[in-house]
Amino acid sequence: MRWKDREGSNNIEDRRGNSGGGRGGKSTGLIGIIVLLVGAYYGVDLSGLVGTPQLGAPQTQQSTPVKQSAQEQELAKLSSVVLRETEKVWGAYFQKMGATYKNPTLVLYSGATSTACGTGKASAGPFYCPGDNKLYIDLSFYDTMKNQLGAEGDAAFAYVLAHEVGHHVQTLMGTIQKVHQAQRQVGQKEANALSVKLELQADCYAGVWGHYAQKDGLFEAGDIEEAYNTAEAVGDDRLQERAQGYSVPHTHTHGTSANRKAWLQRGLQTGDINQCNTFAAY
């Protein structure tokens, strides 16, 4: 990716020097990833997984200097640039629709942190909280992508961030709110199916962003393939088969490898948000 000379976002909140949220449990194995898929891995609302947020006195957090490895420095800069690129694309898209895009905030943290959706933990992977319009990521997740999922590269990481921004777009459009309301009125199997549609739409939205980012010269040869590989790597079926030797379709919450790649591809090829109606497709 050609990102190193590009402008970064101002909407970054760096909590990595705050000790109040906790710093334990950064990594997770493949079995842990499967468990977390049910609730929050690449998810949008942690309230059902990690408890109710504390609305009383704020947690005491002590700031300490952030000791960054060379990789973390690069990932922090990359995250800022990718977020800025999404701001430009979605800002222009909403403007064309006669609406205003509200930029989300990207929170960098270590171990665990407070969110409006409960306590976010690094072991849950990157996530978006619709309660505070913030994306959360522990940069150590890149190592999980590389070592546990077989997905690495700048474009792979950009896809992860763009997917979470896709959930922000869904929130601004009221989609997440409608899905969560519908999920409360059905059984677990039906709720999972709705979750799959929500996640595949976020993949498609990530592709829509990628369509315009590609036109703007952000991607180099091989970058799109990196993104496709990552989408396939985090398919429910592939993760379940790697962890337990078989897949259980009715427990899927994010979609199969084939479907995740297909919807990302649709967004990339069309650049049209209207082609991302996963709820009408299944």
Image: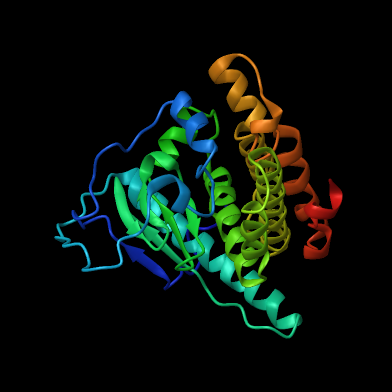
- Vertical side of 131 occupied by 262: above or below: above
What residue occupies the far bottom of the structure in this picture? 98
Identify the residue at horizontal 47%, vertical 49% (top origin): 48
Please name the colour scheme applied to the rendered image.
rainbow
Q: Nearer the viewer, residue 138 or 239?
A: 239
- Vertical side of 3 occupied by 236: above or below: above
- Vertical side of 104 occupied by 276: above or below: above
Residue 278 at what x, y percent from top left?
79, 52
Q: Is residue 140 visible?
A: no
Residue 54 at what x, y percent from top left?
30, 61
Number of marks in the rendered image: 0
Identify the residue at horizontal 30%, vertical 67% (top origin): 55
Identify the residue at horizontal 34%, vertical 47% (top origin): 72
Q: Nearer the viewer, residue 130 or 159?
A: 130
**Is 97 placed left or right of 232 in the picture?**
right
Residue 266 at what x, y percent from top left?
80, 50
Q: Nearer the viewer, residue 43 or 141?
A: 43
Q: Which quarter of the image is occupied by the C terminus?
A: top right
What residue occupies the far top of the structure in this picture? 245
Q: Nearer the viewer, residue 173 or 140?
A: 173
Residue 99 at what x, y percent from top left?
68, 83
Q: Is residue 224 visible?
A: yes
Identify the residue at horizontal 68%, vertical 56% (top origin): 182
